[in-house]
């Protein structure tokens, strides 16, 4: 059911971004269009990254972009951005990044189920790599369904 959280137009595959800030802008764009976040939200993600370092790069090649609810999240949502060319975020252990997942959470609790489903997906053997290799939205959506029915 991970797909129920994805913002309209929120699966963007094999994109080319010039730097980490461009990744944040692209990842938050569908959330902005669907009013799940305010313009302050991508700015907060960038500020947090600059101030606190690359803590959002959670695993090799994977960035989980987010900010606090009060920094501009108005609804629950997420986007998936895969990169044709990996981007460096400054994480010694986990760079370069090929998958940017952007989360919007309007409060401290409503995102728990979404995070559980996302974790299950990412921890399913080989699934993150298959998502990073996906060439079409349909193939990405099929991966979400594959994990759900397993």
Image (cartoon, rainbow, N blue to C red):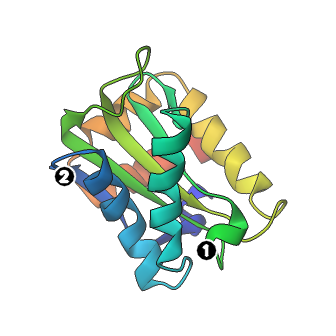
Where is residue 123 shown, x and y percent of the image?
59, 27
Residue under pointer 2: 15
Where is residue 128 shown, x and y percent of the image?
43, 32
Badge 2 marks a residue whose secondary structure is strand
Residue farthest to the right? 109
Badge 1 marks a residue whose secondary structure is loop
45 relative to 32, above or below: above
Where is residue 146 shown, x and y percent of the image?
51, 43
Disc 1 or 2, which lies upstream in sequence? 2
Q: Quadrant of the C terminus?
A: top right
Observer-nearest of 31 and 119: 31
Residue that appears at 36% across and 72% down: 29
Residue that appears at 65% across and 79% down: 74
The crowding category of the residue bearing disc 1, from other C-alpha atoms within 10 Å (few below 14, some 14 to 19, many at least 20), is many
**Mark 1 vs mark 2, CA separation in Å:** 25 Å
Where is residue 94 shown, x and y percent of the image?
42, 20
- Is 16 situated left or right of 150 in this image? left
Residue under pointer 1: 72
- Is 72 situated left or right of 108 in this image? left
Whether tag 1 and tag 2 are in contact, CB under 8 A, the answer is no
116 relative to 40, above or below: above
Residue that appears at 51% across and 74% down: 40
Residue farthest to the top? 93
Q: Which mark is residue 142?
A: none
Residue that appears at 61% across and 74% down: 72
């Amino acid at each position: 059911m991970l797909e129920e959280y994805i913002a309209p137009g929120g699966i963007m595959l094999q994109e080319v971004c010039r730097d980490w800030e461009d990744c944040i802008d692209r990842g938050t764009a569908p959330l902005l269009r669907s009013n799940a976040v305010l313009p302050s939200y991508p700015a907060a993600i960038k500020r947090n990254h600059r101030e606190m370092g690359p803590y959002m790069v959670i695993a090799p090649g994977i960035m989980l972009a987010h900010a606090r609810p009060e920094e501009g999240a108005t609804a629950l949502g997420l986007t998936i951005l895969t990169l044709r060319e990996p981007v460096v975020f400054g994480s010694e252990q986990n760079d370069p990044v090929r998958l940017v997942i952007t989360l919007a959470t309007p409060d401290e609790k409503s995102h728990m189920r979404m995070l559980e489903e996302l974790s299950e997906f990412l921890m399913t053997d080989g699934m993150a790599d298959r998502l990073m290799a996906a060439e079409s939205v349909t193939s990405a959506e099929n991966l979400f369904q594959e994990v759900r029915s397993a």
